Image (tube, grey):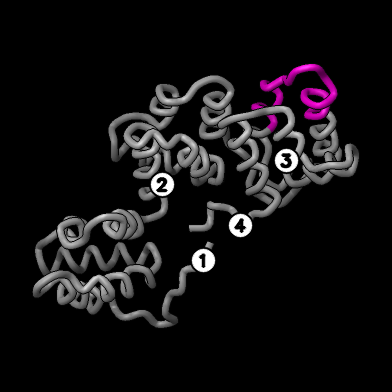
Amino acid sequence: MSTLIVPPVPPSPRDDAIQLHTAFKGFGCDTSAVINILAHRDATQRAYIQHEYRTMYAGDLLKRLASELTGKLETAVLLWIHDPATRDAIILKQTLTAAKNIEAATEVICSRSSSQLQYLRQIYHSKFGNFLEHDIERNTSGDHKKILLAYVATPRHEGPEVNREMAEMDAKVLYKAGEKKLGTDEKTFVQIFSERSAAHLAAVDYYYDSMYGHSLKKAIKKETSGLFAFALLTIVQCAVNPARSCASQ
């Protein structure tokens, strides 16, 4: 994922608001100017710009952008201008209930930290008037539903500390629940993946590889399938390689 480039000393939110207002004037919208401003500001700066625009022009910047832009550019800009939690909430509402892109919803949920998900749940309820868990419950099924519900609701440690003995034990437990037996004990996978920290799961992957000759990801692909497998793989990927995680916002 590309890194957001923010100017060392960005223009004031007031100047940005003026430039955006200017971009809206005339025949058509100067989309290059809009992108150049909004794509190079962080979430806090974008919030200040919205406030300044409302103060100076007595209008809602989001509504003006919606009226000036079209297609995929409109969708991207309107999502980008929100703070990360609100953006996630909008994406989840669309993918769970409207577009029915459950894989995209799964990727968002399973690549966020426990604290991010707790805040996201609050934003989701505030913005849409219903609970994220209810929309997950209505639009998913089976073990996939179980892992998503457990993952959004279970507090997890977010520090780098790892109990190595416990991580090694979890690797053994997952092996017994999967590759060692006929069939798969999905309940064990749900419990460990929803309750353990990212650092812990990275250690579990290390011990699994050391003891059984291949990664935990390979075991997941062998023992599970569909959206359940995709959820587990997303969680492991973000634990083992957080730099490539979708949690970068």
- Judged left or right of residue 188, residue 59 is left
Q: Which comes before the other along the chain, label 4 or label 2?
A: 2
Q: CA distance from mark 2 to mark 3?
A: 26 Å
SS at badge 2? helix
Q: Which comes before the other along the chain, label 2 or label 3?
A: 2
Q: CA distance from mark 1 to mark 3?
A: 25 Å
Q: Which residues are magenta?
A: 173-192
Amino acid carrying label 4: it is Arg
Q: Position of residue 38 (x, y in %)?
A: 32, 68
- Pointer 4 with pointer 3, Cβ within 8 A: no
Q: Which comes before the other along the chain, label 1 or label 4?
A: 1
Q: Which mark is residue 16?
A: none
The residue beneath circle 1 is: 2
Q: Nearer the viewer, mark 2 or mark 3?
A: 3
SS at badge 3? helix
When asked about the image quadrant of residue 146, the answer is top right
Number of numbered labels in the structure image: 4
Q: Which comes before the other along the chain, label 4 or label 3?
A: 3
Q: Position of residue 35 (x, y in %)?
A: 31, 70
Q: Position of residue 247 (x, y in %)?
A: 53, 52
SS at badge 4? helix
Q: Is residue 183 magenta?
A: yes
- Pointer 2 with pointer 1, Cβ within 8 A: no
When asked about the image quadrant of residue 175, the answer is top right
SS at badge 1? loop
Q: Main secondary structure of the magenta part?
A: helix
Amino acid carrying label 3: it is Lys
Amino acid carrying label 1: it is Ser
Q: CA distance from mark 4 to mark 3?
A: 16 Å
The residue beneath circle 2 is: 88
Q: Which mark is residue 217?
A: 3
